[in-house]
Amino acid sequence: MEAMELPGGAVKEVAVSNVAVAGLGSRAEVLKVALVAFAMGVVLVFVTGFAHPEAVHNAAHDTRHALSFPCH
């Protein structure tokens, strides 16, 4: 609590917060982040789709077929 003096000599206690508020990014920043996330997802699907190790291939097998992604 912090004391604040009002006109006429009265004193009022005021709560002060030190919490920082994160602002929302601009529309361009949000779209850039969304595009990067989408690109990383597409790369991940293609890398696992054509991976030669059996463990990597089978880890995402059903999901790829559910998304109509060929892997055979």
Image (tube, helix red, strand yellow):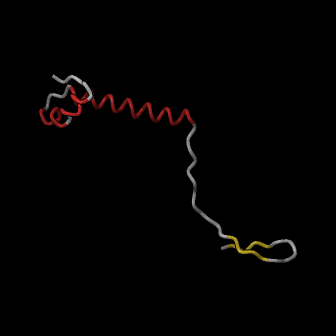
At a point 56% along the width and 50% down the height, the residue shown is 22
Residue 53 in the image: state x and y as whole percent.
Answer: 13, 32
Asked where in the image residue 46 lies, by quadrant, the reply is top left
Q: On the rendered structure, is 49 left or right of 40? A: left
**Which is more toward the observer, 10 or 56?**
10
- State whether residue 72 is above or below residue 18: above
At a point 25% along the width and 28% down the height, the residue shown is 47
Residue 5 in the image: state x and y as whole percent.
Answer: 79, 73
At a point 12% along the width and 33% down the height, the residue shown is 54
- State whether residue 70 is above or below residue 32: above
Q: Quadrant of the N terminus?
A: bottom right
Asked where in the image residue 24 lies, by quadrant, the reply is top right
Q: On the rendered structure, is 44 left or right of 27? A: left
Residue 2 in the image: state x and y as whole percent.
Answer: 69, 73
- State whether residue 39 is above or below residue 21: above
Q: Residue furthest front?
A: 66
Q: Residue furthest bottom?
A: 10
Q: On the rendered structure, is 27 left or right of 33? A: right
Total numbered labels: 0
Q: Quadrant of the C terminus?
A: top left
Asked where in the image residue 38 lies, by quadrant, the reply is top left
